Amino acid sequence: MPVAGTLAETYLRSRGITLGGKTSVLRFHPKCWHRDEGQTKSIPRPALIGAVTDGEGALQGVHRTWLAPDGQGKAAVETQRRAMGHLLGNAVRLTQCDDILVIGEGIETMLSVREAAPGLPVWAALSSGHLGAVLLPEGLRRLYIAIDRDPAGQRAAERLTARAAEVGIAVWVLEPRLGDFNDDLRADGPAVLRQHLARQIGPKDQQRLEI
């Protein structure tokens, strides 16, 4: 079902995100089956569902984030997230892109960028490995890679930068102040995060930061 008014919206708001219910690629499932490693019985738990699509918009997989019963955080289980389907090269396309795109790993991370700068098109690749392998859309001229502040994120950015450069796409790497952009959003709020992004965005796209 749509995110608005559900535990999924409660969860996103607990992460400082208010725009999560406004994208059609996110859904809420009240009883999504979950099973940790070593368990023999699946248990239905509430979950935030993200649609993984290809360049034609066709559904290729889903990403599940299991939630606490009250929505205030993720479920108290060992495996809180899991993806299924054909993921390599595809992404959770949280908004439509045009000639620019901001792409990073987690759904919450990229929704945080959107929270601070709704004019920036954002996709979530779901992991550092998939970030380096995302198939870039035709007509893309400028790519922003929103990294997590860890070695895996740096390596993924290097791989994607090299692939983009081969086809003439200009690349900027956006670095969070803390561990990731959701950490920044929760610590500082959207206005401060927008200022932090403004110092890293190319001059042609500064107007996209205006609210």
Image (cartoon, grey):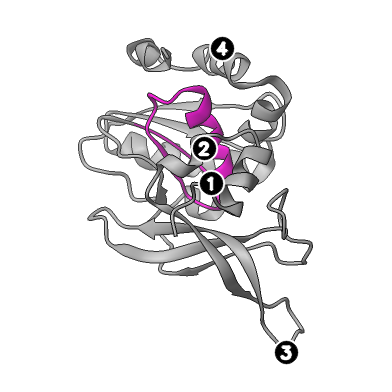
Q: CA distance from mark 1 to mark 2?
A: 6 Å
Q: Residue 66 falls in which quadrant of the image?
A: bottom right
Mark 1 neighbour class, 10 Å CA radius: few under 14, some 14 to 19, many 20 or more:
many
Decide which of 59, 17 is in the foreground and name it.
Answer: 17
Q: Where residue 210 sits in the image (x, y, percent)? A: 41, 12
Residue 187 drawn above or below residue 102: above
Q: Which residue is mark 4?
A: 195
Disc nearest the viewer among 2 and 4: 2
Mark sitting earlier along the chain (2/4)? 2
Residue 58 drawn above or below residue 113: below
Q: CA distance from mark 4 to mark 1?
A: 21 Å
Tell whether 108 sits left or right of 67. Answer: left
Mark sitting earlier along the chain (3/2)? 3
Q: Which residue is mark 1?
A: 107
User: Label 2 amino acid?
Assistant: Leu
- Looking at the image, do the residues carrying marks 1 and 2 touch, with CB atoms under 8 Å apart? yes
- Secondary structure at numbered mark 4: helix
Q: Where residue 74 sits in the image (x, y, percent)? A: 71, 55
- Secondary structure at numbered mark 3: loop
Residue at 53% across, 48% down: 5
Q: Which residue is mark 2?
A: 111
In the image, the segment drawn in magenta is: 101-128
State yes or no: residue 123 in magenta.
yes
Q: CA distance from mark 3 to mark 4?
A: 49 Å
Mark sitting earlier along the chain (1/3)? 3
User: Label 3 amino acid?
Assistant: Thr
State yes or no: residue 88 in magenta.
no
Q: CA distance from mark 2 to mark 4?
A: 16 Å
Q: Which residue is mark 3?
A: 40
Mark sitting earlier along the chain (3/4)? 3
